[in-house]
Image: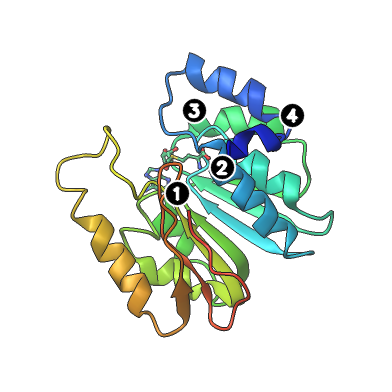
Amino acid sequence: MDGLSWISPPPQVEPILEETVRMNFGLASEPLVGALLRILAASKPGGRFLELGTGTGVATAWLLSGMTAGSTLVSVDIDPAAQAIAARFLGNDPRLHLVNAGGLDYLATLPPESFDLVFADAMPGKYENLNLSLACLKPGGFWVGDDLLPQPNWPEGHAAKVPALIGELSRHPRFTILPLAWASGGGGGSEVPGIGEITQ
Ligand SMILES: C[S@@+](CC[C@H](N)C(=O)[O-])C[C@H]1O[C@@H](n2cnc3c(N)ncnc32)[C@H](O)[C@@H]1O
């Protein structure tokens, strides 16, 4: 089954992807990842969401499209040029707060148990200080990380970090995980006793 043929992306994704190609940004999230994020966002009415690594705003658009009116999304990136694309196409959505900062600096400011979902799509909070992004999840919250299947653009030494990350998540006393071997692959989890176990 071609799952993608059943999925309608939010309207902002197409123009964002055009700009993403134009600026040669090669790290945008894939549609199945976006669709997963959208349904997880929809499962938390009034939820608080955090994206680490806005990029040009592809996953940001998918998350916003699943969120209820009373939900909020903070999306953090260190790269102002990429994030400016997200601001151009999504910045008029009052639910979105774009933060231009280092992920670790931002995570360090967060009170514990303050978000319903973290999309960890940058090194900070995923391969660096995973504990910080897990600690900011509320009970029942979802942590989603992608790009866990081998990618041609991985830097030297990165491949060994992936099983270490999945292993750490699998042993974590607060979380249960579901590795999903599709799109760019992933691993993550929902807090026990969450309903679904999530990753991509
Ligand atoms: C995989 S891309 C994000 C893709 C985006 N979430 C999407 O859906 O298309 C990773 C992003 O992390 C950002 N990044 C890299 N190092 C960072 C850091 N230390 N703090 C915050 N963001 C960082 C990069 O600028 C890049 O935009």
Q: Earlier in the sequence, mark 1 or mark 2?
A: 2
Alpha carbons under labels 3 and 4: distance apart: 22 Å
Q: Amino acid at mark 1?
A: Asp
Residue, x 55% and y 72% (percent of image)?
137
Establish whether ligand 1 lies closer than 8 Å to the Cβ of label 1.
Answer: yes
Neighbours of disc 1 within 10 Å: few (<14), some (14-19), many (20+) = many
Disc 1 is placed on an element classified as: loop
The residue wearing badge 2 is: 32
Q: Amino acid at mark 4?
A: Pro
The residue wearing badge 3 is: 81
Q: Nearer the viewer, mark 1 or mark 2?
A: 2
Alpha carbons under labels 1 and 2: distance apart: 15 Å
Q: Earlier in the sequence, mark 3 or mark 2?
A: 2
The residue wearing badge 1 is: 121
Tell me, for residue 11, which label it has, or none: 4
Q: Earlier in the sequence, mark 3 or mark 4?
A: 4
Neighbours of disc 4 within 10 Å: few (<14), some (14-19), many (20+) = few
